[in-house]
Structures are given as C-alpha cells and as structure tokens.
Image (cartoon, rainbow, N blue to C red):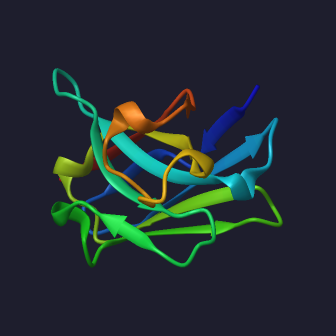
C-alpha cells in the first residue's frame, strides 16, 4: 500500500515562500505521476500542479503559474512544491497525490478522481 506524507506547511506572510515535501513509500515511486491539490475551508479540493513520472513534464493551474514549481527526486521518493510570492488566497490544506502511470498515456492530470493515493495534508496559512 502506498503511503504519502506531506511536510513543510506553516504560517507565512504574504509575499513569502514555502517548500512542501511529500515522501512516497510502499511501491515504485517512478511509476506514478504526482499531483498537488489544495482545499480551503468550505471550498472544493482543487488541482495546484503536477509532474509526470519522469519529471520531464509539469502542469499548473493558472492561479499559481509563475509562482509555484513542482519537482521530484526519484532517488529520494519525494515530490516538492516550491511556493513563492504567496498570497492570502493560497491559504489551504495542501495534499499530495499519486496517480499510477501505467494505466494511461495521458500524463499528469488535474482530475482528482484519477489519483489513487492521497496524503493526510499539510496546512499552509498566508497572512496579509
């Protein structure tokens, strides 16, 4: 069974930066596309960004393009979300998720229902 553990959340002022990490265990990390999602209070969970199994392709939602970067280190079984120029609207619980790459040629997806495994989430709070 896959386990995902996020870390790195916290409280930061607007304009600041945070780097989230997500450690993967239980199966072969390089067989999974990885996504980052977030959920603010009383809002639906939304896609933030993702990276394909090889690390060669990334995809972001429009609101974070140019500010957030997803990367992965397959040797460390870890995916990262570097968040710069944070805004109060970025406040949410951030989740990483794993989508098995073997059942599709489509690459990383923003569809949360495509993801097979989820972490427990880490809180990010951006103060104004």
The residue at the point 42 percent across, 37 percent down is: 114
Q: Is residue 42 left or right of residue 77?
A: left
Count of residue discs: 0
Out of 117 and 63, give the one closest to the viewer.
117
- Residue 59 placed where, x, y %? 35, 67
Q: Is residue 39 left or right of residue 1?
A: left
Q: In the image as oriented, which residue stretches furthest toward the top?
A: 42
- Residue 84 placed where, x, y %? 36, 71
Out of 93 and 96, give the one closest to the viewer.
96
- Quadrant placement of the N terminus: top right
The residue at the point 81 percent across, 61 percent down is: 76
The residue at the point 61 percent across, 44 percent down is: 7
Answer above or below: position of 25 versus 28.
above
- Residue 36 placed where, x, y %? 43, 49
- Residue 20 placed where, x, y %? 54, 54
Q: Is residue 77 left or right of residue 123?
A: right
Answer above or below: position of 75 versus 128.
below
The residue at the point 35 percent across, 36 percent down is: 112
């Amino acid at each position: 069974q896959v386990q995902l553990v996020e870390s790195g959340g916290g409280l930061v002022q607007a304009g600041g930066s945070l780097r989230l990490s997500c450690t993967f265990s239980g199966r072969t990390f390089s067989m999974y596309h990885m996504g980052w999602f977030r959920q603010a209070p009383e809002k639906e969970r939304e896609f933030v960004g993702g990276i394909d199994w090889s690390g060669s392709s990334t995809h972001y939602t429009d609101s974070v393009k140019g500010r957030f970067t997803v990367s992965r280190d397959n040797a460390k079984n870890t995916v990262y979300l570097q968040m710069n120029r944070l805004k109060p609207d970025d406040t949410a619980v951030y989740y990483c998720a794993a989508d098995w790459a073997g059942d599709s040629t489509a690459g990383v997806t923003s569809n949360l229902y495509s993801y097979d495994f989820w972490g427990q989430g880490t809180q990010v709070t951006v103060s104004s």
